[in-house]
């Protein structure tokens, strides 16, 4: 007979790892499936200074490793595989992967989000040739060079500050006339002598043959265009949910965020969503971890009522 897990968690970022920890501590039989790197987006973040109680100089990678270790210590099982199909209806859910098929009484979807493209000409052609979406991954390629960062939120500003450790200059290009990042981050940015700011502006085009050489900018108020020398361009203009797998099977917003209630339940009994995949106000490690804990706890109650 096929093994049936209590819970299968799809995605190994902070939401999935937190759900795994809480479920395993409740003596549930848990499997976490992750297709790439455990830790998700946070594993590529250089500095984590807003997660309560984190150690000094905490990085996304060290926090992710510790989260996974904690879950493992309580018995959470992990597998590296890519989900190809899910059957969410019925008492027993089925998760088909490239390497195997798994069954469970409940599913917690924690697939997260991916960086939104800047949407300018030649962006894809020069991706990985000067255009990047991960400062921690690629910063050291731009030692003593001129870097541009697109965006004005927390991610954009914190990554821009990090990039000043490497680049000669870091210019933030933002479509508004003020940053949206936390005031503490803004203060750091404005006081950093390597940082410059261009307001009310978008990138129209990336220029370069083999490597990025510059950007064509457009002021959205005046319509005026200008050229800016750039050896590197880091795009931080938001994220989109990784929810393609679940389209037509679960209630979502038009953008693709999965809709849940306050205990992370979706519209399908026994199926939960947690972290950046769900519709929510704040997308941070702390809220993802909290979502995962809530989802796992409610999944335990659901199983007790439904199957015991």
Image: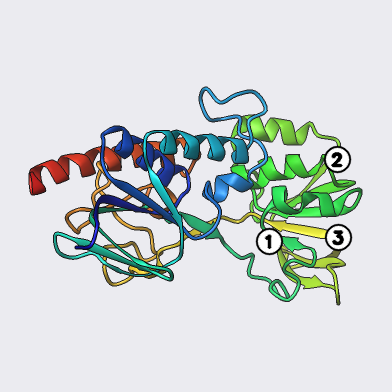
- Tell which circle, 1 or 3, labels the residue nearer the N-terminal end: 1
**Disc 2 from disc 1: Cα separation:** 26 Å
Q: Which residue is mark 2?
A: 194
Mark in the foreground, 1 or 3: 3
Identify the residue at horizontal 26%, vertical 63% (top origin): 251
Is 22 placed left or right of 143 in the picture?
Answer: left
Q: Work out whether residue 244 or residue 155 is closer to the camera in this orientation and state it.
A: 244
Residue beneath the point at 72% across and 68% down: 127
Q: Whole-Å distance between the Cαs marked 1 and 3?
A: 26 Å
Q: Which residue is mark 1?
A: 221
Q: CA distance from mark 3 to mark 2?
A: 15 Å
Residue 153 in view here: no
Judge whether 63 appears above or below 149 on screen: above
Task: Residue at 86%, 60% (x, y): give it.
Answer: 231
Tell me how the rendering is colored: rainbow
In screen coordinates, is 273 left or right of 133? left
Local crowd at mark 2 within 10 Å, few (<14), some, or many (≥20)? some
């Amino acid at each position: 007979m096929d093994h049936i897990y209590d819970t299968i968690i799809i995605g190994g970022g902070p939401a999935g790892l937190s759900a795994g920890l809480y479920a395993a501590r409740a003596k549930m039989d848990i499997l976490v499936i992750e297709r790439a790197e455990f830790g998700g987006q946070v594993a590529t973040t250089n500095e984590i200074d807003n997660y309560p109680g984190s150690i000094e100089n905490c990085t996304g990678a060290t926090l992710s490793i510790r989260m996974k270790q904690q879950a493992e210590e309580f018995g959470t099982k992990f597998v590296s595989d890519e989900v190809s199909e899910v059957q969410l209806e019925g008492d027993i859910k089925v998760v088909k992967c490239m390497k195997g098929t798994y069954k469970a009484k409940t599913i917690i979807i924690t697939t997260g989000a991916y960086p939104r493209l800047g949407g300018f000409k030649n962006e894809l052609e020069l991706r990985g040739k000067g255009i990047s979406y991960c400062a921690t991954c690629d910063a050291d390629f731009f030692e003593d060079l001129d870097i541009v960062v697109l965006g004005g939120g927390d991610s954009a500003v914190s990554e821009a500050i990090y990039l000043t450790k490497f680049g000669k200059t870091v210019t933030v290009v933002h479509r508004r006339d003020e940053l949206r990042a936390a005031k503490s981050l803004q203060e750091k940015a404005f006081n950093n002598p390597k940082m410059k700011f261009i307001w009310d502006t978008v990138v129209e085009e990336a220029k370069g043959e083999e490597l990025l050489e510059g950007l064509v900018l457009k002021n959205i108020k005046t319509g005026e265009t200008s050229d800016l020398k750039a050896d590197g361009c880091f795009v931080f203009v938001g994220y989109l949910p990784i929810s393609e797998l679940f389209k037509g099977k679960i209630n979502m917003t038009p953008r693709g965020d999965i809709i849940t209630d306050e205990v992370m339940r979706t519209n399908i009994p026994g199926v939960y969503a947690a972290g950046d995949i769900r519709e929510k106000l704040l997308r941070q490690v702390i809220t993802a971890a909290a979502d995962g804990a809530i989802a796992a706890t409610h999944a335990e109650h659901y199983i007790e009522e439904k199957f015991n």
